[in-house]
Structure formats: structure tokens, C-alpha cells
Amino acid sequence: MGRIRLIPGGSDIQNGDISLFLLAQRAQVPVHSVLKNAIERWDDDYGPKTRFADLRRADGSFDVDRYTAALRETVDVIVIDQQPSLTLMQLNGLVAATSVIVPQTMKGFDLSTLSTYSQNIAEYLDYIEETSADAIGIGRHVVLPTIVQEANDKDVDQIVDLYQRAPELFLQVWYPRSDAVANAAEEYKSIYEYDPPRSRRASTKTFIDSANAVNDALVDVVWGSALPSRGYARDFIKARWEE
């Protein structure tokens, strides 16, 4: 996996809420901040140690081995994939997060559920802010349209309407509905690893183009101008919003 580290969930995750409650009691911290505190402790102990000057040898050449080792000193970003519910585990993830990305279909019932979910989260966070010093939501929080039926004007019109109402909240890129993803999953591969038959190459490429645009947009959400854009999101938006 190169520079990617994975911590997969398993059957024991169903005991997560109980474990968090017991950990909070033992550490005498609010139950909603257990994960946030753990990440902060890890960051304090395993922050980057190599300086830019350390990457140059005495003769001025670039030390590739030192650079490669430095990449493993810490992590650049932590992605926490959560289920769409509001338990102690999900609340810990929200409090620990710098940015929250909400994948969302454009169907009316699902959007109604998102509204209810958001209101419940807001009530919890208001209470937390009143009762503790935890800083919540210091980054951008966005909704990512997903499983969008581009051939159906209703889905696209819904995205346009929502973006016009809240441009700071809804992204202009999306994952389209595609059989290519299911086909890749059947072979236990990501869409980037999947080698489709000739009849499915066009749909696979279309989805990859959209995935690249989404990746670009999410990098911008997390890092802003700190990383240069590859242009995929810009091209996606130009093709669909400016024509």
C-alpha cells in the first residue's frame, strides 16, 4: 500500500460505544472527545522530525533515502469512514474531524433524512460547546453529491438548486451512477485497478474522470491552496456548469 496505512473495522466494532464509554470514565474525559484526544496524543508523539535542510547531503545532493524515511514519520491526513448514524462512535468522529464530507444522493427522501440528521448533530454540538472547551468544526464541511443519474435532469437540477442556495456547502463535482464501480468491486479492485472489457471502457473512463474531479475537490477542501490543483475539478465544472 506504499504510504497508505489502513485500520479496518471488524466484528468487534459493534462494542465501540461501550468501549468509548469505559475509556472516557477511565481517562476522566468527556465521552465525545476520546478519539480527538487520542489523535492529539499520537500527533504530539509522532509529529514530523525531519527538516528540509536534512534532505541535503554535505555535497548538496538530494538524499532520497532520508526523504523516503521522512514520509513515514507521521501522516498527512486521517480519513475516518463512518456509517450514517449518530452513536457515540459517530459523535467522536465528528468532534475529532477537521472537515466533514457527507456523501449524499439527490433523492427527496434521502435529502429529508440529511436535514434531520444535520439538525440532530447541531443539537449535540451546541450542547458540547456549552459544556466543554472542545474546538469543533475548524475546517470546511461539505456535501458531496453521489450516485447522480446524469441522464436524469432531476438529479442534476437538484444539485444546481442546492448549490445556488448554499454554494459554500455543496460541491460542484459528484460521483455519477455507474455500473463500472460494481464491476470493479466484483473483482475486488478499485476503479483505478479495474481492467474493463472493451464494451465497458467508455463508462469506466467516465467514472474515473469524475472520481479524479472529486479527489481534486476534496484535496482543496482539506488543504486549500497549500497543494496545487491538478485541474480535474476545474475541467469537470467547466464541462457541466459553464456550457
Image (spheres, helix red, strand yellow):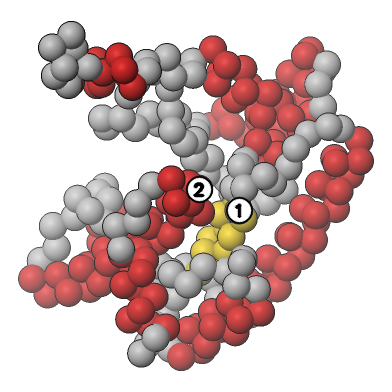
Residues marked 2 and 1 touching at CB (< 8 Å): yes
Q: Which quadrant is home to the N terminus?
A: top left
Q: CA distance from mark 2 to mark 1?
A: 7 Å
Q: Residue at the spot x=19%, y=50% of the render?
A: 193
Which of the 4 image quadrants contains residue 55?
top left
Q: Residue at the spot x=50%, y=32% of the render?
A: 10
Q: Which residue carries the number 2 mark?
A: 222
Q: Determine whether 20 is above or below 233 in the image.
A: above
> Left or right: where does residue 29 sit relative to residue 202?
right
Residue 188 image offset from top left, x and y in percent: 26, 47
Res. 44 visible in picture = yes
How many neighbours does mark 1 have within 10 angstroms: few (below 14), some (14-19), or many (20 or more)?
some
Q: Determine whether 18 is above or below 101 in the image.
A: above
Local secondary structure at mark 1? loop
Residue 15 image offset from top left, x and y in percent: 66, 29
Residue 17 image offset from top left, x and y in percent: 71, 32
Q: Residue at the spot x=26%, y=63% of the render?
A: 208
Residue 189 image offset from top left, x and y in percent: 25, 49
Q: Which mark is residue 140?
A: 1
> Left or right: where does residue 226 sit relative to residue 107?
left
